[in-house]
Amino acid sequence: MKSFVMKSPVMFDLPMRHKPWLPRYLRWVMQDMGGGARQPEQDHRTHLRATLEWLCRAQDACLGTPASGSVAAGWTFGSGWQPASANATGWLIETLLPAADYLVWPDLTNRAHAMLDALLAKPDEGSAGRIHGLIAGHVQLGHPGSLERAVRSGHALADMPMTSVVQHAQAAHALVAVGVIAADTFLLEAARHHLQATLAQQTPCGWFTSSPLPVQTNELAGILLGLIESARLLDDADVHLVAQRIARGLRGQLRSDGGLTGAFDDGWMPAASYVCVAGLAQLAVCWLRLAQVTQDAGWRDPAWRALAWIKRNQRTTGCDPDLRAALPGAVPIWGGPAAFSIDALTAKHFANALMMDMVGITIPPETHERAR
């Protein structure tokens, strides 16, 4: 009874804020009430194109605003398109560029240029996504001023306080990426500092502590991706082994149908009744990345199952452009801390995984030397 009393205000608040009774949303809610993963599963290319079309609409939502060229952070049932996000905008540059080549879609390159211009028009700040976008501007677009701006943003990030393990891991990845290219020893040392802060929170089973508990699958996936890429760039075998431990733990929890619980307690104890789509998409990237780095094809099976499950939850048809091909934050749509929302970075990770599996590429491309 105590649990019901504590949770009921939240349950009553959700309909008031997110308006799921509106006709444009009610169909989605009713479908999820009947069970998830029931949409037609199509080939990778079809899902990739649909996902990128939705991301183009997320960018178009910012046209005519001071953040024109940027990408909206996402979309929610309650308030529609969210404000522009420099973090999401930066991360998406490295996704649109290979997609433009693979799909022979030149407008995606133009959109990536517009995203870079939007980043350059803003003051430097410590955002991991911004740094990755500026790196893409330097390496992939050849913009002459992007590296200097990435370094300045890296120094701003190095000075920022971190409040969670995933922030440490993502900061380490961004700092080592720009530190390697710029040969900036301060940024490389800062990256190692954040790596140590990340590793200090790992428990014997490979799970990571967090506050509040339980840990969301999306956080675990973000930690894992940061460790994989940092270990590769630093050529650090110990960090790579730590990454493989958490990757095995999450692989062991993946259901046969490709679904994965949205949160965990220590010992890999499932702690949620919903699936975190954002976390699952990012994990597909992680498992495929491990397959590339280790040359172990065994990592591809969990990625394939995860991608198939996400496909079966993507509605690629419909007359509502805001919802067509959108990936929910959770299944069912009312689950977890991202209830009734759609996040641009979920689409990014899904698109990355699809391309990595189809073409065998790395995103971003490995075009610079490792740090020593």
Image: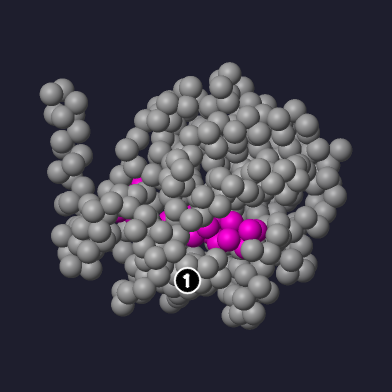
Tell whether 47 sits left or right of 232: left
Which amino acid is tagged 1? Ala
Tell whether 11 sits left or right of 308: left
Q: Residues within 10 Å of mark 1 (few under 14, many from 20)?
A: many
Residue placed farthest to the top in the image?
204
Residue 54 sits above or below residue 184 on the image: below
Q: Quadrant of residue 122?
A: bottom right
What span is in magenta?
338-357
Residue 101 sits above or below residue 165 on the image: below
Q: Position of residue 83 (x, y in %)?
A: 41, 61
Residue 340 part of the magenta-drawn span: yes
The foreground one among 320 and 295 is: 295
Identify the main secondary structure in magenta. helix
Q: Quadrant of the N terminus?
A: top left
Q: Which residue sits at x=50%, y=50%?
A: 306
Q: Identify residue for label 1.
A: 50
Q: Position of residue 85 (x, y in %)?
A: 48, 58
Q: Which residue sits at x=64%, y=79%?
A: 104
Q: Position of residue 204 (x, y in %)?
A: 58, 18
Q: Position of residue 175 (x, y in %)?
A: 70, 43
